[in-house]
Amino acid sequence: MDLDPINNQLRWTSRRAKFAKPEYEAFWQIVERHGGVSLGREKDFDWMHFQFARV
């Protein structure tokens, strides 16, 4: 799922991405609690994307 790609562009790091800001910490905790993975939090890019997938 991609959310708000204008403010969280693929190659943006936490320095620019809106979803990297402290006010989104609770959102990420909820996503992760339910098994979601964020490349933004894992690799510091693609902050608009998170997924619930098994490979």
Image: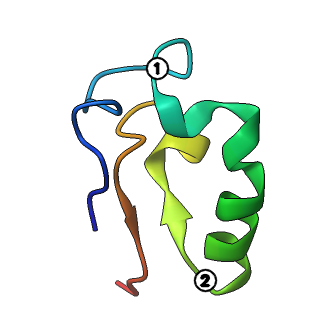
Which quarter of the rendering shows the C terminus?
Answer: bottom left
Q: Residue 49 is drawn in which quadrant?
A: bottom left
Q: Is 13 placed above or below 25 here? A: above
Is 54 in front, or is 17? 17
Quarter of the figure with residue 53: bottom left
- How many marks can you see? 2
- Can residue 18 be seen here? The reply is yes
Q: Is residue 42 above or below residue 26?
A: above
x 26%, y 58%: residue? 2
Q: Look at the numbered disc 1 and give the secondary structure of its residue.
A: loop
In whole angstroms, how far apart are the C-alphas of marks 2 and 1? Answer: 23 Å
Q: Residue furthest top?
A: 15
Residue drawn at (53%, 40%), measured in percent from left and top? Answer: 19
Q: Residues within 10 Å of mark 1 (few under 14, many from 20)?
A: some
User: Which residue bears the numbered disc 2?
Assistant: 35
Give the SS element for disc 2.
loop
Asked if residue 45 lies left or right of residue 31, the reply is left
Q: Decide if residue 47 is on the left or right side of residue 19.
A: left
**How is the rendered protein coloured?**
rainbow
- Residue linked to disc 1: 13
Residue 8: image quadrant is: top left
Picture coordinates of residue 3, whole percent (x, y): 31, 55
Instruction: Kindly tell me whether residue 44 is visible in this rendering.
Output: no
At x 33%, y 30%, the residue is 7
The N terminus sits in image quarter: bottom left
| Residue 30 image position (x, y, % from top left) | 70, 74
Q: Position of residue 40 (x, y in %)?
A: 50, 41
**What amino acid type should be assigned to the residue bearing mark 1?**
Thr
The residue under label 2 is which amino acid type?
A: Gly
